[in-house]
Image (spheres, rainbow, N blue to C red):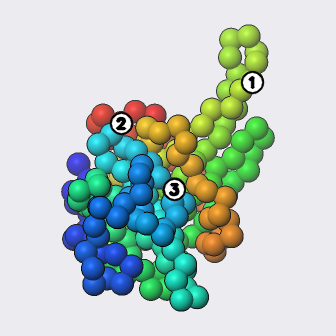
Amino acid sequence: MLYFLLSPPAYSQDNITPYTANKQQPNTLCTTGEQSIFTCFTGKKTASLCIKESRNDLFAQYRYGTSKKLDLAYPETQRNSSGKFMLSTTPYPGGGANRIRFVNGGYNYFMYDITKPKVDSDGQSYPIFMSGILVRKNGRNIASLYCDNEDAGISSIAFDIFNEESFDRNIDMSGTALPGHSP
């Protein structure tokens, strides 16, 4: 599975105190005093991008795992961490895509939400929503997790926080679904 992509145990804001689930907010991996920018349920695991303002600095950390054990926390320390995440958007007729990207150990991780128009058999158009996490290495999609929760999406706050970058439109965000996770 994704074990080869995961890092050592996670640590909280100051990289001294181990992450503790008892301070966790419901339905996210963010702790008390943090805000979730993106939370995605992927079967038995959750991914959350959490932010917290402290001492005139904005901390940001991506977490993946369960409330009992994190498999990945990036970056390990949250000092000056918001600059490690980049935001990109792609508008198109009837929808658009938002992505937050970070690089960890040569792997590019994309948290995304996509709105696309779909036309039914009666010719009526309606939006469909998709969100997930795509992992790429050396220009290839190597893992894709789709969010099971309908409210998974990138919070509008992300547009005020993260630096924007242009996005390569040739990247297929649908990726390759892992067993047990369908689009």
Helix, strand, or loop for circle 3?
strand
Instruction: Give the label, 1 or 3, closer to the camera.
Output: 3
Label 2 with label 3: CB-CB less than 8 Å: no
> Which circle marks residue 125 in the picture?
1
Measure the alpha-carbon separation of dots 2 and 1: 26 Å
Pointer 2 local density, CA inside 10 Å: few below 14, some 14–19, many at least 20:
some
**Residue 93 drawn above or below residue 164:** above
Amino acid identity at mark 3: Phe
**Residue 182 drawn above or below residue 166:** above
Percent x, y for residue 148? 43, 37
Where is mark 3, residue-wise? 38
Foreground residue among 30 and 172: 30
**Residue 52 drawn above or below residue 16:** above
Percent x, y for residue 106? 36, 71
Pointer 3 local density, CA inside 10 Å: few below 14, some 14–19, many at least 20:
many
Instruction: Give the label, 2 or 3, closer to the camera.
Output: 3
